[in-house]
Image (tube, rainbow, N blue to C red):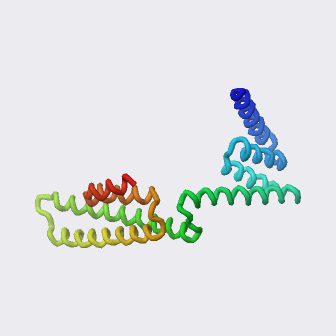
């Protein structure tokens, strides 16, 4: 019975897909397809996209209401599931977190480039000590910026796996702190 049900769902998916291709301006077909995606396929994002495309076809008033209502329901469900996955961050905290994460990535890249430049200068036969000193001070500042960004990220969301992985790799690969880096990678 399960195989027949799965085959039926697959056939319905294909019928909707080809029906939308053949009639791209049929709003009621798009809404029906969005309901199918939401209820049977459990793909909220795809259902939301389909409703957005249906909205672009200038639907009638009752169809506009259906589209608006279900878009709102889907968006709320997606936001709720993301909030649960992120420890209950609100929109402002999420934006701040993303900005600090981008800043952390940029500072890590800058620090790694400075470390590479330092080691390339050091590997020369006659290294320029003044240049090494200048690069070394820039490295200290860049590492401090990374530490500052990390502490800001920790205040906003202390258990984001992407940020912990990034910072752990920075500790291991750039600062050669295997113990500290492994600690973050294990979390």
Q: Residue lying furthest left in this view? A: 126
Is 120 above or below relative to 140?
A: above
Q: Count every numbered label the image shows and give the total.
A: 0
Quadrant assignment for the C terminus: bottom left
Q: Position of residue 21 (x, y in %)?
A: 76, 40
In terms of depth relative to the viewer, which is nearer, 172 or 134?
172
Q: Tell me what residue is drawn at x 56 percent, y 64 percent.
A: 88
Quarter assignment of residue 18: top right
In terms of depth relative to the viewer, which is nearer, 85 or 168?
85
Q: Position of residue 127 (x, y in %)?
A: 14, 64
Is 47 above or below relative to 19?
A: below
Quarter assignment of residue 135: bottom left
Q: Tell me what residue is drawn at x 58 percent, y 59 percent.
A: 84
In terms of depth relative to the viewer, which is nearer, 106 or 156?
156
Q: Residue lying furthest right in this view? A: 61
Q: Position of residue 15 (x, y in %)?
A: 77, 35
Q: Is residue 46 left or right of residue 168?
A: right
Q: Tell me what residue is drawn at x 71 percent, y 49 percent.
A: 47
Quadrant assignment for the N terminus: top right
Q: Position of residue 89 (x, y in %)?
A: 55, 66
Q: Tell me what residue is drawn at x 58 percent, y 68 percent.
A: 90
Q: Is residue 42 left or right of residue 121?
A: right
Q: Is residue 156 left or right of residue 177?
A: right
Q: Is residue 31 left or right of residue 99?
A: right
């Amino acid at each position: 019975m399960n195989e027949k049900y799965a085959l039926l769902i697959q056939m319905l998916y294909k019928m909707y897909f080809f029906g939308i291709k053949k009639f791209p301006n049929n709003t009621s077909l798009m809404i029906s397809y969005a309901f199918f995606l939401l209820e049977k396929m459990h793909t909220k994002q795809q259902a939301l996209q389909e409703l957005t495309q249906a909205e672009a076809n200038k639907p009638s008033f009752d169809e506009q209401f259906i589209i608006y209502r279900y878009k709102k329901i889907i968006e709320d469900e997606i936001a709720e599931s993301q909030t649960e996955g992120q420890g209950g961050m609100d929109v402002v905290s999420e934006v701040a977190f993303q900005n600090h994460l981008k800043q952390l990535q940029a500072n890590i890249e800058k620090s790694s480039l400075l470390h590479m430049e330092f080691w390339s200068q050091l590997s020369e036969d006659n290294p320029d000590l003044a240049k090494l000193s200048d690069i070394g001070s820039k490295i200290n500042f860049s590492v401090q910026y990374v530490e500052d960004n990390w502490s800001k990220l920790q205040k906003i969301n202390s258990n984001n796996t992407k940020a912990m992985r990034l910072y752990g790799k920075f500790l291991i690969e750039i600062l050669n702190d295997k113990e500290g880096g492994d600690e973050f990678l294990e979390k």
